[in-house]
Image (cartoon, rainbow, N blue to C red):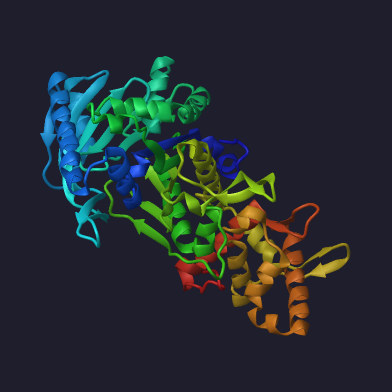
Amino acid sequence: MNKDHVFLKQYNPQIAFTLECFDRVILKGYLRQLSYPAGVRQFVDYTLRIKRKDFMPWAKTQSQRIADHAKALAQSHNRPYIFLRGSQRKDAIAGGILRTHAITEGLVCVLGCLEHCPSFRLIQAKGRPDFVPARPPALVFYFYYLDPTLGLIHIRVPTLFPWPIQIAVNGHDYLAQQMIRAQMGFEQHDNAFVQIDDPEQAQPLADAFLDALTPTRLRQLALKVLPPLDQVLTRRAHYWVIDQAEFSTDLVFRDPQQLATLYPRLVDHAVLNFKAPDILGFLGRRLYARFDGEVLTDCKKDRLQGTRVKHRMKGNWIKMYDKGGRMLRLETVINNPREFKVRRKRQRDGQSVMVWTPMNKGVGNLYRYRQACQAANHRYLQSLAAVKPAPTVAADFRRLGEPCRQADRPHAGFNPARSADLALFQILCQGHYLLNGLVNRDVRQQLFPAAAADPGQSRRASAATGRLLKRLHVRGLLLKIPHSRRWHVSPRGRTLFTEILRAHHTLINPIPCANAA
């Protein structure tokens, strides 16, 4: 992480080190032709060349091979096979076996359970039977491996056609294996590092995780657990996609008490001040009239692990929590990558041009996932920089209310108790302005919404907004972006506005958001 980040510069004496790393990544492999009804019909009619009513017995034979192979694999490696009933934490069971048996490499255990799986069923249709999607319960196997490169992973294989494969890996376990190879000292609690001898050397090792997950490597892992199936299946390679990716930014504090003092204020700031436009801004989006989706903030304070704040938008979210009482972790989770835009080459009028397109789930896009998550974490952390463990805004607060002069021109002060000034501060603190700054129009439309209908009133509102921005600029609370008409709120300004709004939220009365959501 860049040491010039405003949050790191502000808390540098208290932070021991930072680490940015993928956390849990879930990848799925599909036999593409067998993943939709038309493909299944074509496979049965033209590849297998059997009657459709005979396909289900054929598929059942393949499923039985998978079940027999899973139990035989556990027996041949002298590892336990456990059938689970009800909801149980499979990772905790595998971790307990790993600690008990002191396994250094290879198969840890095989867990079986009943789960509803996507599949197809045969129905009577006009002319001949047809395949339709279904989700029946089926036997599913979880193969837990301690891989010398990736650490503890699991491979999920359902026994039900069309046999999609899921592989779950953890970037922190991968980094632990790399640091062991490099003979680097570290202390790991769960999926977090609370001490690393050389954090600057550890970060490049964590970044190399992108090169470890290639389709070839994933196919090698899948072949460890797949039995010899029918030849028409073994000729078909799985197409691998990213089903879920978590990327964390960890800030480890030297003294847990310092984090314990700061973290409640961060939670209050996130819950009270981050509205829908802010959350969208952290995730690289802007709120617009045709936005179709929910934006939610959830705060849980009764967790054994500590207080956690989660901001959710269309299946993607940002989380903040104090991991183990020593680490501030920001984590962005992507389940729906199409909500993010990336630059890709496309053919336009016969020419190859770079255009913005929705991000897809292909494994080759993992580096794009990293870029999107890292940018979201950094923007969120930049907004949190407005919070200080012991606010030192008395001087700025006093100057805010006093008139000042610049170039022999007077500039009036602000009244922090005045509703119009509070609405202005609320607008300036909105998180989506962290992306590209703000212009006169952004503030004017929220402060004077009625003026848009009348051109004369709109000009007067524009002039009034310009004077407000100038009054903040001469006090150093608003900074002009060179060679543009855009503004950025300065770190001093964001801290001051945040403390003023927090005081009104917590000490007086909640103030309404000025058209923020």
Whether residue 153 can be seen here: no
From this view, report whether residue 353 is shown above or below residue 125.
above
Q: Residue at x 49, y 52 (%)?
A: 338
Observer able to see residue 189 = yes
Name the residue at 73% across, 77% down: 461
In the image, is residue 34 above or below residue 412?
above
| Left or right of 173 on screen, residue 110 | left
Nearest the eye: 324 or 99:
99
Q: How far across and down, in percent of the image, does residue 472 sit? A: 72, 63
Q: Is residue 106 above or below residue 9?
A: above
Out of 477 and 34, give the one closest to the viewer. Answer: 34
Identified at 21% across, 25% down, the residue is 108
The residue positioned 44% from the left and 48% from the top of the image is: 334
Q: Residue furthest right?
A: 408
128 or 163: nearer the viewer? 128
- The answer to whether residue 342 is left or right of residue 52 is right
In terms of image quadrants, where is residue 420? bottom right
In the image, residue 393 lies at what x, y percent? 60, 56
Quarter placement of the N terminus: top right
